Image (tube, grey):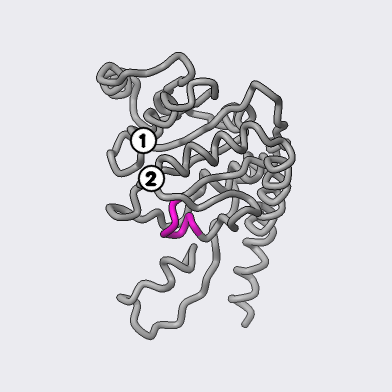
Amino acid sequence: MVSGFLAGNPKLGGRSISLIPNAVNSRISEQANPVDWFPGNFTVLMLASLRPYKGTQEFVNLANRLSNIHFMLVLSDPAEEVEKWQGTLDVGPNIEIFPVQEDVISFYQRSQLLLNLAHPDKWLETFGMTVLEGFCFGIPAIVPTQGGVAELVEEDLNGYKIDYTDPDLMANKVLELAQNQFLWERLSRGALIKSKEYSLPEFERKVLEILTA
């Protein structure tokens, strides 16, 4: 299983479970140079789909609320669907919305904070690969309080766990990270440290350990 959340599924009964988290794609890890914090140039990134429970509307609402911060939303949907959806929104000049991309590395390289606004009351993330990829670049994350993605984030060490149902706390925390370089740099270091636990060599070591047990 890739996460404790999946391993704890009661439907598995008393089966013996081995926990082997996903590893970061080698292409990502090879190009993942740590990002920097620049005053007045703070960018918040989210990678998601247009499914309502992925939190796209909440992301737009947050961007409109924090008009002095730059937001980027990268969707896994084709351009025509994204354009149709965007046409229904009141989008401020501080948010950029992109359709499906072949390569998202450049988006990580331009960001200082990663959001996952999935709705845990409707759907639970089993792991959270985009959060882990962001960690490789030293990007802290704000994620839901439940699901596999929550296991990646250690509170106040590499990010925060805040549900989409608390937009005030979400906005305050984003603003704090955009204004407090010392806090952001501490969380960025924590994100880099955490990413090392999910490297390909570490993944191979865990698999070999199970096979030779």
The structure residue drawn at horizontal position 69% and vertical position 24%, both measured from the top left corner, is 39
Is residue 85 highlighted in magenta?
Answer: no
Residue 88 vertical placement versus 4 (above, below): above
Residue 109 vertical placement versus 121 (above, below): above
Q: Position of residue 210 (x, y in %)?
A: 59, 76
Q: Position of residue 120 (x, y in %)?
A: 34, 54
| Mark 1 lies on residue | 58
Residue 17 vertical placement versus 61 (above, below): below
**Which quadrant of the structure image shows residue 117?**
top left
Callout 2: SS: loop
Q: CA distance from mark 1 to mark 2?
A: 7 Å
The residue type indicated by label 2 comes to: Tyr
Q: Nearer the viewer, residue 31 or 107?
A: 107
In this rendering, position of residue 73 left or right of residue 181: left
Q: Which region shows up in magenta?
A: 144-150
**Which quadrant of the structure image shows residue 174?**
top right
Callout 1: SS: helix
| Mark 2 lies on residue | 164
The residue type indicated by label 1 comes to: Glu
**Which quadrant of the structure image shows residue 26?**
top right
The structure residue drawn at horizontal position 27% and vertical position 23%, both measured from the top left corner, is 85
Residue 145 vertical placement versus 185 (above, below): below
Quarter of the image with the C terminus is: bottom right
